[in-house]
Amino acid sequence: MLEPVLGTDQSSPTQPALSRVVPTLLKGVIYREEDADAWAQLVALQGAVSDYVRVLGLELYLDEAEGFAFLRSLPEDEEAESRAPRLVARRQLTFPVSLLLALLRKKLAEFDAEGSQARLVLTLDELAETLRLFLPDGSNEARLVDRVETHLNKVAELGFVRKLRRAPGAGPQAYEVRRIIKAFVDAQWLGELDQKLAEYRQHLGQEPRDQDDD
């Protein structure tokens, strides 16, 4: 991603704060729990930040309830009008990664409905068991876990899960599902999830048994 140089005019009282917040956003997601100072500045200046990044062909997505914010490209019609070069690259997700994101979003919705805790943490074994339902019969157990872990690493790179630290011999690897996934899998999409999962299962059932899906 390009790093724009902000103006040097210090006459505006918001300029120094913008110079700190905007570059931080251009580097990635701001989480309230991880960077309280940047989050407080962003909430206070969200109008000015939105105006600034719009010139760059970007829009600010800020969820105060969940405590995260990030930049994304303007909708295509607005992006064409802005004529700004695209700063956020589009990524084509593989089928298994898309499926895993859908299942994680469903798990988070079920977790929130229970309302007992703030963080959804799942182990690698639990996720492998969830994904097993959508794989052809006869998939090798060790191979299944390895494949799920590979896909989880890609999901972690995208920022939708966080791999938690664990001591040697402390049990299966655990992952925290990050709430930013709600911004990418919205309520309407979630409402159609059962149909989409049925389509996923049909698609996987058509694959040759034990074929690599990368």
Image (cartoon, rainbow, N blue to C red):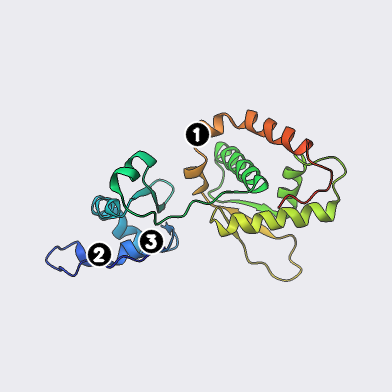
Residue tagged 2: 17
Which residue is depicted at the point 34% across and 45% down?
Answer: 79
Left of 64 or right of it: where is 55?
left
What amino acid is found at the position of numbered circle 1 in the picture? Answer: Ala
Q: Distance between the residues labelled 1 and 2?
A: 34 Å
Q: Quadrant of residue 146?
A: bottom right
Crowd around label 1: few <14 · some 14–19 · many ≥20 (10 Å): few
Q: Which of 75 and 66 is in front in this view?
A: 75
| Residue found at x 33% / y 51% | 57
Residue at the outermost left position: 11
Q: For the residue carrying disc 2, how many other residues have a C-alpha within 10 Å: few (<14), some (14-19), or many (20+)?
A: some
Say what secondary structure mark 1 lies in. helix
Q: Which residue position is annotated with label 1?
A: 187
Q: Is mark 3 on a helix, strand or loop?
A: helix
Give the Cα separation between the discs numbered 2 and 3: 14 Å
Disc 1 vs disc 3: which is toward the camera? Answer: 3
Q: What residue type is labelled 2?
A: Ala
Q: Which of marks 1 and 2 is nearer the N terminus?
A: 2
Q: Name the residue under label 3.
A: 26
Disc 2, disc 3: CB below 8 Å? no
Reading the chain from its start, which is encountered first: label 2 or label 3? 2
